[in-house]
Amino acid sequence: MDRSFYHFVLSFRGGPKDDAKAVFAEAMFHDHSFPKQEYSFDQLSRYLEEKADGKMPITVFDELYDRYQEQIR
């Protein structure tokens, strides 16, 4: 699969406002510097750690990345 993490997470946009994955997806979409073509866990987590946006917490990223990995296997 050649779908980036960014494009995978976009599928969670528009979800309930109390769904952490939907909130993450919406914040990611509005972050114009998010690495849209990145696949690497290390690169993505480094970006999120440096950005430190409360709407994109690492715990939610970890859950989404696990789902992403399951889908690309």
Image: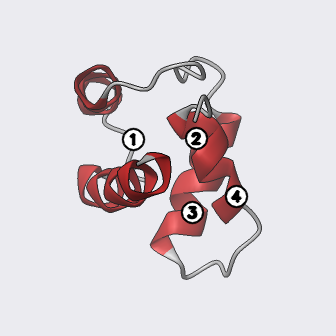
Mark in the foreground, 4 or 1: 4
Q: Position of residue 51 (x, y in %)?
A: 35, 27
Kindly identify which numbered label has been placed on residue 67: none
Q: Position of residue 27 (x, y in %)?
A: 59, 47
From what the image shows, is residue 22 above or below residue 29? Answer: below
Q: Residues within 10 Å of mark 2 (few under 14, many from 20)?
A: many
- Residue that badge 4 annotates: 11
* Lateral position of residue 8 relative to residue 40, left or right: right
In this view, the residue farthest toward the right is 14
Query: Which of these two is toward me, 51 or 36?
Result: 36
| Circle nearer the N terminus (3, 4) | 4
Amino acid at pointer 2: Met
* Lateral position of residue 59 relative to residue 39, left or right: left
How many numbered tags mark residues here? 4
- Distance from disc 3 to disc 4, alpha carbons, whole Å, reads 12 Å
- Residue that badge 2 annotates: 28
| Circle nearer the N terminus (3, 2) | 3
- Residue that badge 1 annotates: 53
* Residue at disc 4, secondary structure: helix
* Residue at disc 2, secondary structure: helix
Mark in the foreground, 2 or 1: 2
| Circle nearer the N terminus (4, 1) | 4
| Circle nearer the N terminus (2, 4) | 4
* Quarter of the figure with the N terminus: top right
